[in-house]
Amino acid sequence: MDERVRRNLPWVLLAAIVAALALAGPIHLPQGYHRFADSRSLLGVPNAWDVLSNLGFLLVGVAGLSIAAKLPATPARLWWRIFSAAVLAVSVGSAWYHLAPDDARLVSDRLPIALACSALLAAVLCERFRLKPLSAHALGMLLALAAWASVAVIPVLGGDLRPYLVLQLVVLLVIPALNWAHRVPCTEQIGFAAASLCYVLAKLVEVGDAHVFEATGWFSGHSLKHLFSALACAAVVGVLRRRARANS
């Protein structure tokens, strides 16, 4: 394949994501979003399975922090640590939201997710473009600010979810394209592709929340979404684990 096509693919995907969402018009939270299929309690915990299924993020976040500390001291290492810390924070924020779902608590659920996405993107960009420390940290802070605004500012002002969706789609599509364009090792490309696949599965079962619950009778689509999303994060941490082993 022409090298120019390979190098330009990530930017073509980025432009396509932005253009598609711009053409789609404002996207708002659906009516009844906070009514999830499984409202069962367990040992006094309301919505127990939607709450407890966040334990996966806790485990992955703790593992990620431990592994990131063993990585070489590059500008990207800080953002791998922040990514892992944000994944850990997802377990707390999402559990808090699902105890009593409403608009106010939704920010605590989505903000750590957005920060995890921004930190992951910052770490990958630092590595692919070999950014110097000052540039790397400036980029990371800019992405973190954009993540915060996409959850805490823009939806409050107009209720438009598109900036939040752009961030997730960029992580889902552009990062694997960057890895391919820059010819990173095949094992790492597989790890990031597995993360993207798990996240797609998470979104699919989230949409089918009630259908999954009706089909299984014991687990809802939203609870499964948490598990698939945690697996996506685990796939990324697995990439870091192999790096840490190779450098030990």
Image: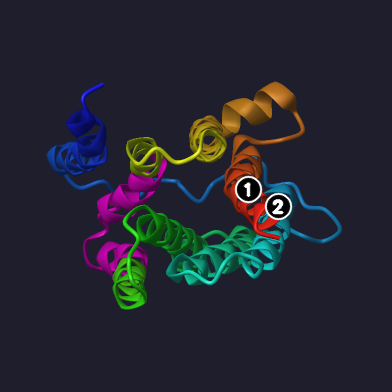
Q: Nearer the viewer, residue 235 or 209?
A: 235
Quadrant housing residue 227: top right
Which amino acid type is marked by label 1? Answer: Ala
- Asked if labels 2 and 1 touch by Cβ distance under 8 angstroms, the answer is yes
x, y percent for residue 223:
65, 43
Q: Secondary structure at mark 2?
A: helix
Distance from the alpha carbon under mark 1 to that under mark 2: 5 Å
Q: Residue at x 60, y 47 (%)?
A: 239
Query: Residue 169, how many percent across, how many down?
Result: 35, 43
> Which residue is at the front of the view, 113 or 240?
240
Q: Secondary structure at mark 1?
A: helix
- Mark 1 highlights which residue? 230
- Above/below status of 234 relative to 58: above
Mark 1 crowdedness (10 Å alpha carbons): few <14, some 14-19, many ≥20: many
| Amino acid at circle 2 | Gly
Q: How is the image coloured?
A: rainbow
* Residue 213 shown in magenta: no
Q: Is residue 129 left or right of residue 225?
A: left
Taking the spot 21% from the left edge, 61% from the top edge, the residue there is: 158
Which quadrant of the rendered structure holds the N terminus? top left
Q: Which residues are magenta?
A: 146-172
Q: Which residue is mark 2?
A: 56
Q: Is residue 20 above or below residue 112?
A: above
Question: Please, what is the dominant secondary structure of the magenta stretch?
Answer: helix
**Residue located farthest toward the front when viewing the structure as drawn:** 247
**Direction from residue 1 to residue 97 in the image, left or right:** right
- Between 170 and 183, the residue placed more toward the observer is 183
